[in-house]
């Protein structure tokens, strides 16, 4: 299988940074596990097509209008065209799913409830490694996740993909509506929570995706840039100070959980309100 240079570069960068920080040796010492086919089929059976209907290309406006409440200065609207559909996991990756790959150092609560909590304290490098590990074993076991085309690959979403599937065709502050009360119905944030909740925990959006607002921040593939390019299948700059975060968390105010809200974090950091979600997307989106 050929690997695009952009993807190969991300893997090399991931491994080099993890090695420098000692994380790679730690993961290898714990052992990256060889999962059984049945376990992967059970845990990763469900994927949601985004959008649910229609043929590509798909157009939407990324960012927030100038009059949106709590709007930040890095949310200038740009038109985006996504040339392919994608398949998205309906929930964040959980502790139980992380443990299929490797022992989690902070996994102390062994109850079944904890296994359904979103995994946190995971760096961007670890999240990227998890995606590559799952993609390897998906192909090894010839699994057709979600009915996506065979050439599609498991990865973190781009920032544009993340906002696209969060909005699910809407243009409001949250997919449910504009008010904080609308958010409370579909997301965990500072007004109704002080800790992460098991997934799925809130009602899914119009495309079947749960907890796209609040609960835990989720890593995106892109490097952060204050000014973004629109156009076809956009990605961030080739380097930067931090990777993009989206979604907000249980500890954030409503404004951080908006569909257009953006944040960044150094890729080697792991935080207790930061996790990730996986997508299946066409290989050409990385070019």
Image: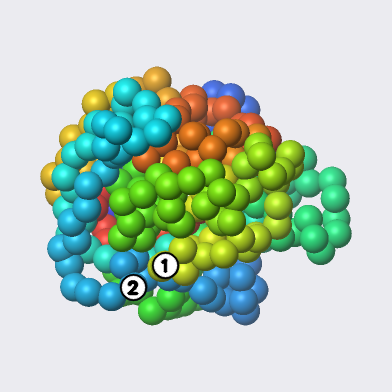
Relative to 149, is 119 on the left or the right?
A: right
Identify the residue at horizontal 27%, vertical 61% (top origin): 282
Q: Is residue 181 above or below residue 123?
A: below
Instruction: Find residue 15 and report its horizontal and vertical position in percent.
Output: 48, 36
Q: Which residue is depicted at the point 57% across and 28% down?
A: 269
Dot 2: element: loop
Q: Residue at x 48, y 46 (%)?
A: 179
Which residue occupies the foreground of this view, 14 or 270?
270
Q: Is residue 129 shown left or right of residue 78?
A: right
Alpha carbon of mark 2 to alpha carbon of mark 1: how far?
8 Å
Specify whether 155 is left or right of 234. right
- Judge depth for marks 2 and 1 and give the one in front: 1
Whether pointer 2 and pointer 1 mark residues with C-beta atoms closer than 8 Å, the reply is: yes
Within the image, what quadrant is residue 121 found in? top right
How dense is the environment of label 2, judged by Cα within 10 Å: few (below 14), some, or many (20 and up)? some
Q: Label 1, on which residue? A: 206
Residue picked out by circle 2: 52
Camera-side residue of 274 and 78: 78
């Amino acid at each position: 299988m050929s690997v695009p240079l952009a993807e190969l570069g991300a893997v090399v960068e991931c491994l080099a940074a993890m090695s420098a920080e000692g994380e790679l040796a730690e993961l290898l010492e714990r052992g990256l596990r060889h999962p059984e086919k049945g376990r992967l089929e059970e845990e990763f059976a469900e994927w949601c097509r985004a959008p649910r209907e229609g043929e590509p290309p798909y157009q939407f406006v990324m960012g927030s209008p100038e009059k949106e409440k709590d709007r930040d200065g890095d949310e200038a609207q740009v038109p985006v065209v996504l040339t392919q559909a994608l398949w998205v996991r309906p929930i964040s990756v959980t502790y139980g799913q992380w443990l299929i790959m490797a022992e989690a150092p902070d996994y102390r609560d062994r109850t079944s409830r904890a296994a359904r909590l979103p995994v946190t304290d995971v760096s961007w490098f670890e999240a990227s490694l998890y995606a590559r590990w799952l993609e390897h074993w998906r192909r090894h076991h010839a699994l057709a996740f979600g009915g996506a085309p065979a050439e599609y690959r498991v990865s973190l979403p781009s920032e544009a993909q993340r906002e696209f599937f969060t909005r699910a065709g809407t243009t409001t502050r949250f997919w449910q509506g504009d008010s904080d009360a609308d958010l409370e119905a579909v997301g965990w944030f500072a007004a109704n929570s002080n800790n992460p909740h098991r997934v799925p925990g809130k009602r899914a959006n119009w495309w079947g995706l749960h907890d796209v607002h609040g609960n835990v921040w989720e890593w995106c593939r892109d490097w952060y840039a204050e000014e973004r390019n629109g156009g076809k299948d956009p990605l961030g700059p080739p380097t930067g100070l931090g990777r993009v975060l989206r979604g907000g968390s249980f500890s954030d105010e409503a404004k951080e959980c908006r569909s257009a809200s953006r944040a960044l974090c150094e890729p080697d950091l792991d935080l207790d309100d930061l996790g990730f979600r996986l997508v299946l997307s066409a290989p050409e989106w990385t070019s």
